[in-house]
Image: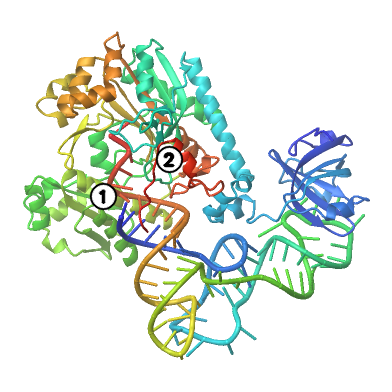
Amino acid sequence: MKRTHHCAQLTKSDLNATVSLAGWVDSVRDHGGIIFIDLRDREGVTQVKFDTNLRAEAAQLKSESVIGITGQVVLRPDAMMNKGIPTGEIEIDATGLVVHNISDTPPFPLTDAGGDKVNEDLRLTYRYLDLRRPKMQKNLRVRHRAAKSVRDYFDSQGFIEVETPALFKSTPEGAREYLVPSRIHPGEFYALSQSPQQFKQILMVAGVEKYFQIARCFRDEDLRADRQMEFTQIDVEASFIDREGIYALFEGMLKKVWKDVLNHDLPTPFPRLPYHDAMNRYGVDKPDTRFGLELVDLSDTFKASAFKVFASTVASGGSVKAFNAKGLANITQGELGALEDIAKSLGAKGLAFIKVEGGEWRSPIVKFFSDAEKAALTSRLNIEEGDIVFFAAAPWDRACAILGRTRLEAAQLLVKRGKMTIRADQWNFLWVVDFPLMSYDDERKSYVATHHPFTAPVGEDERLLDTDPKAVRGQHYDAVLNGMELGGGSIRIHQPALQKKIFEEVLKIPGDVVESRFGYMLKAFTYGAPPHGGMAFGLDRMVALLCGTTSIRDVIAFPKTQKAQDLMAQSPTPVTAKQLKELHIQTVIPPQ
RNA sequence: GGGGUGGUAGCUCAGUUGGUUAGAGCGUCUGCCUGUCACGCAGAAGGUCGCGAGUUCGAGUCUCGUCCAUCCCGCCA
């Protein structure tokens, strides 16, 4: 019985045709003398009617059983048309039934609404059932279409896809890696590639000029809603390109993807925001600009304040910052406590605030403020009835971080109260630029690369490398959408001397270590490395946002849990002694 | 490594101040039903209250520990 149509296809125009359909039993409605079965395949649902000798057999079918049917397309009685689905005007009068498989009762409802409520661990244990849900089927297709759109785009721009090894060598400077023991070389290891970074730069030396790859990458760091141990990035590198060229290239890609997948016209170019401004105004380097609640710097206002906490912070070089969570004065004690806990976890001593209720400023600290200070606050923060203003006084970067998080939490509280809407389909792309090339790591007592050590300094800042490394801006850029970092990249260093200097003199990596880790790269650069730059762009995160979710697990067919386990296949597992012996591995299990 | 939330029937949840036989909706099973599309009606089965210990005359409820899931911090060059 060969399938002639899919289950979202047949309409009035097919009346009287004899057809065959195949799929899963979505529901059985048994009326005794007549049985209706909704037959579902990946395209949709068609109603099948059994009122003949097949009735008894159809009555045995259970939900999710797999069947094939043959029958005639007939019109439903007038009053029985279902306008809700494309096939709602017709039904199939079944004359043949093949039962391919009777299904056990599924452990959870396979509807969109029902399945969304189910504990995710159960969905992951039965991922093959979860993926049957229309919503998950749609997510898989969005991912496919987005990936195809990306490939078509880079192809049209003259880029070629080159595969690079997943088994690379260990580069412990970066993220923690997955190590793979070598059987042939006892005691030696490969590492799963965290990113094709070094290979793609080598490809530039190799004269490829325009490379891209939809590449699987692996990082052994703790998982999050937007981080999996293996993930997919759109990896791009081009020669003879500058930052403007990269911006235009990726704006073009995103424009095409949004058009192909959502039929939405993205406006370009995207706004650009220097890193320092992003921190100062939003308290993060990946601001969600769909709402305001911007941070204001009040260090000047309070530098001579009678309120010692603020004045002394400014005196010691720190900042006093604040933002107005407009309309949130009715925050509950519990919510306020939660905000304070978050602030404290980021190093705040507390979370000072001013509430305006009944025309009064209610606050534990307002008694310390002069009239001039109050007036400055009112005008700079536009304080009105019903508002609550949160303060942070700390070193600049910490004050930014504290209020940056508080701002996001306050926004959620305002959304919960219906006082603010944050639309999942509003697309606030932006480029965050002018990152510092390096930051000082107190633990390691040395500078570390903010992005990675291959990032080129901004030309005019290069002279500061020896005198004031942290003032040097990198030719680095992040693509941010709605508070999520979608990708990052840079123009790279292509002169071996500068690269060696960054490694050894600025980052203080010993020469022999540089030689063993990066020697091949420095050597390659001596044979005519073109100027080049690129970007690594998270496919999972992009697809998640296209699907209206922020969890990449929703757009990865078989994701791991936060404890890095596959609940369906049940990995990881112990291995046999023989396997370990072959790999020259001994395990030491810590006592429980 | 740290903090928050959750774990009660197959699923989603309720369970009061610690007190009789732990409930509801959906699903499942049985029966009836020829126009449903979340079919309907009648009935039934289904519980290691995550696990372990403690307090108590008595624990789903209180305490401690632990496991799992999830969100966040650290971490993610």
Residue at 29% across / 27% down in the picture? A476
Residue A406 in view (yes/no)? yes
Give the amino acid at mark 2.
Met
| Secondary structure of the residue carrying numbered label 1 | helix
Please tell me which residue lies in front, A468 or A418.
A468
Please tell me which residue lies in front, A28 or A123.
A123
Q: Which mark is residue A229?
A: 2
Circle 1 residues within 10 Å: few <14, some 14–19, many ≥20: many
Residue A267 percent across, percent down from the top left: 43, 28
The number of numbered badges drawn on the structure is: 2
Give the amino acid at mark 1.
Leu
Residue at 36% across / 28% down in the picture? A169
Please tell me which residue lies in front, A379 or A310.
A310
Looking at the rendering, in which quadrant would you find the N terminus of chain A? top right
Which mark is first along the chain, 1 or 2?
2
Q: CA distance from mark 2 to mark 1?
A: 30 Å
Asked if labels 2 and 1 share a chain, the reply is yes
Q: Which residue is mark 1?
A: A403
Q: Chain of mark 2?
A: A
Residue A343 horizontal side relative to residue A288, left or right: left
Residue A343 percent across, percent down from the top left: 26, 55
Residue A146 horizontal side relative to residue A286, left or right: right
Circle 2 residues within 10 Å: few <14, some 14–19, many ≥20: many
Residue B20 percent across, percent down from the top left: 58, 87
Colour treatment of the image: rainbow
| Secondary structure of the residue carrying numbered label 2 | loop
Residue A232 horizontal side relative to residue A243, left or right: right
